[in-house]
Image (tube, rainbow, N blue to C red):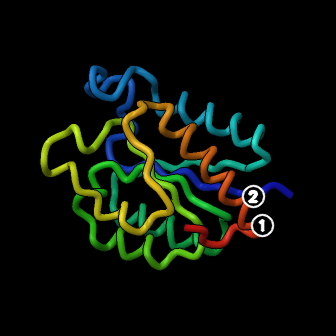
């Protein structure tokens, strides 16, 4: 039975491909999700994707994921910089969580250079555009394989 990884996309990720393409690229979220599912198959993982613009829905998904998924790949978007509640949820999780960002947060505005959520994840991958997701999924797969059971591996 394949291990299941949940991919959670935060606010405005549904606008990828058209929102500031000079910053975020032209690839759509649908394309990213399709590639992640294919890569997941290659890595022996089941991949389930979810996008929301609502903080509470993101938190609700993570609380369910900690009981039903083996790991999570997240792009909290703007919630990274503002949501103590989301950071608290991640801190309480018992499965590994890898955070990704399309852009390099340290090369952005000062308000975006701090990730409240990043302090509680297994690792953060940023600045590689849509490839950040692929790199994140590969790292998550590696952590799951190394841990043997899918519980939090930092």
Viewer-proximal residue among 137 and 56:
137
Viewer-proximal residue among 46 and 44:
44
In the depicted structure, whether residue 89 falls above or below residue 142: below
Q: Residue at x 31, y 39 (%)?
A: 104
Viewer-proximal residue among 26 and 148:
148
Q: Residue furthest right?
A: 1
Q: Which residue is mark 1?
A: 148
Residue neighbourhood size for the residue with mark 2, other residues' Cα within 10 Å, grouped as few (<14), some (14–19), many (≥20): few
Query: Is label 2 in a helix, a strand or a loop?
Result: helix
Q: Residue at x 27, y 20 (%)?
A: 22
- Which percent across, then down, holds residue 93? 52, 75
Distance CA(mark 1)–CA(mark 2): 5 Å
- Contact between marks 1 and 2 (CB within 8 A): the answer is yes
Q: Which residue is mark 2?
A: 145
Instruction: Please say whether residue 61 is visible from this viewpoint.
Output: yes
Instruction: Please say whether residue 65 is visible from this viewpoint.
Output: no
- Which percent across, then down, holds residue 9? 44, 48
Query: Is label 1 in a helix, a strand or a loop?
Result: loop
Q: Give the position of the C terminus as an image quadrant.
A: bottom right
Q: Residue at x 62, y 31 (%)?
A: 35
């Amino acid at each position: 039975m394949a291990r299941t990884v949940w991919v959670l996309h935060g606010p405005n990720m549904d606008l990828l491909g058209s929102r500031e393409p000079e910053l975020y690229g032209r690839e759509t979220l649908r394309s990213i999700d399709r590639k992640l599912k294919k890569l997941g198959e290659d890595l022996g993982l089941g991949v389930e994707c979810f996008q929301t613009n609502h903080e509470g829905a993101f938190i609700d998904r993570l609380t369910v994921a900690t009981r039903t998924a083996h790991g999570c790949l997240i792009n909290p978007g703007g919630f990274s910089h503002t949501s103590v509640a989301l950071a608290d949820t991640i801190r309480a999780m018992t499965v590994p969580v890898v955070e990704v960002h399309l852009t390099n947060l340290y090369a952005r505005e000062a308000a975006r250079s701090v990730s409240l959520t990043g302090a509680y994840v297994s690792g953060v991958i940023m600045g590689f555009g849509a490839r950040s997701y692929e790199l994140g999924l590969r790292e998550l797969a590696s952590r799951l394989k190394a841990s043997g059971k899918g519980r939090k591996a930092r």
